[in-house]
Structure formats: structure tokens, C-alpha cells
Image (spheres, rainbow, N blue to C red):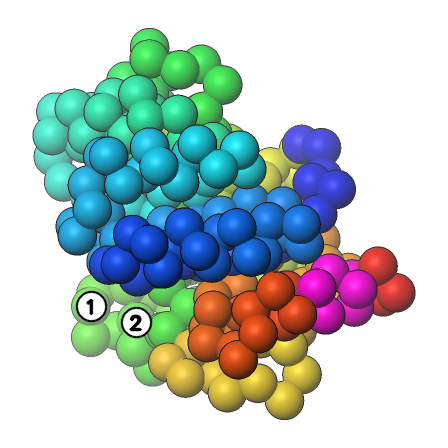
Amino acid sequence: MARFQNPVFVAIDTPDLKRALDLAKAVRPYVGGLKVGLEFLTARGPDGVAAIVEMGLPVFADVKFHDIPNTVAGAAREIARLGVAIFNVHASGGEAMLRAAREAASSVNPAVKLIAVTVLTSFDDKDLEPVGQLGPAADQVVRLARLAQSCGLDGVVCSAREIAAVRGALGADFLIVVPGIRPAGADLADQRRVMTPVEAARAGADILVVGRPITGAADPAQAARAIMESLDHG
């Protein structure tokens, strides 16, 4: 999988369409793509996603579909129609669901990248057992990544701490998307398994999803530029 020239995707997860568009315009010179999540999607729907796609940068729709195969297939077709570059499902939905999503999305847009969420970056090892998953987190991430690859998916979402394990197990062509990226000294908020942008890029991440350190900054454009420059120098 070819690396993105600029791997930073900024998470513009706000219900306010004007603010989302303003943020996208401000950071556009300094990022490689935009990510929209559930808050934006439930507030603004398909028209909102289309407006973000029209900004001209690759868009990652962070929808995390997880349901029966037929339902996820229908949802996958609809999100693929919107022109997004990437969307995701939960790997824990199982083989039938993953294959149904792959087939449905490809039938609409063969170029769309489908990736699977492994273990949420808000989790650590102690959070897995209560939800019936086997730890440690790194092992569970690799198990789910192997499943996703076997079902024809393009990559996974994992924390920066699992990049090396996923890359080693799944190979150089498997897309690795990493949320929870925090510049040095930034507030971790609800993220637990994190790295700086430079650390994650060096470890082999293809896409770095950065949210609040950019969108919550007094000057989002300058914050995005600083991350871009840190990657250039790193």
C-alpha cells in the first residue's frame, strides 16, 4: 500500500456544518485528508458528508458499522456512494459481515478502501475481559487484523502501539490507520494507547488521525502546520 505524501487526516467531528467546513478550509494546505465521525454523520447526514467530500481532500468516514451482514452490506453501499475514500466496520462483526461489507462497497465504488476497527484506542488490556475479548490488546489486534485481511479488507484501525505487530503479521501492503495521535505534551483526554505523529510515522502508520490537538487549538491551521513540519523534519 503506497504511503500518503501527507499522512495526517484531521478529525472534524462536530455537528456544526459551517464549523466543519471552516476547519477543513483552514487546515487543507497542511493535511492529507479529513475524517468525519458519528457526531457529524448523525447531525448532518449524507448531504453533510458530500459537502466535506467536495472540499477535494480524501475523506475517511469513521462509521464503525457493526450489525448483521445484510444490514452492514446495505450501509456499506450507501456510504460508498458518497464518494468517501475510506470507511470502516468493526472486525469483531465476524467473517460473514466483513465479506458482505467488502462485496457491497466494491459493487458501488471499487476504489473505496474498507478498513476494520480492531481494539478501540480508549481501551487497554484490563478493558477487554469485561466485554469477552482475549487480551493482551496487541494480541487481539493482530487476531482481528488477520481476520480482516482474510476477508479482503484493505487494512485496519489500531493504536500506534500495535503498528509494528500488525505490520509484521500482515505485511507491507496492509493499510494501517492510527487514531489517538497526540503531539508531545498534548492532553491525552480519553485516549490511552497513544504516540506522537513522528513516532507513529516512524513505526509504519499509513494514516495518522489527529483531532483535538488541531481542532481544539486556538489556531487550527498553525497546529496542523506544526504537525506537518514535525513529520517533515522527523
> Percent position (x, y) of residue 47?
24, 34
Total marks placed: 2
- The image quadrant of residue 54 is top left
Where are the magenta residues, as a range?
225-231
Q: Say whether marks 1 and 2 touch (CB < 8 Å).
A: yes
Q: Residue at x 47, y 69 (%)?
A: 215
Label 2 sits on a secondary structure element that is: helix
- Disc 2 marks a residue whose amino acid type is Leu
Q: Residues within 10 Å of mark 2 (few under 14, many from 20)?
A: some
Visible residue check, residue 87: no
- State the residue position of label 2: 128
> Percent position (x, y) of residue 21?
41, 50
- Disc 1 marks a residue whose amino acid type is Val
Position of 137 compared to 38: left or right?
right
Task: State the CA–CA distance, disc 1 to disc 2.
Answer: 6 Å
- The image quadrant of residue 93 is top left
Vertical relation: 38 (above or below) 160: above
Q: Residue at x 63, y 89 (%)?
A: 185
* Viewer-nearest residue: 213 or 89: 213
- State the residue position of label 1: 131
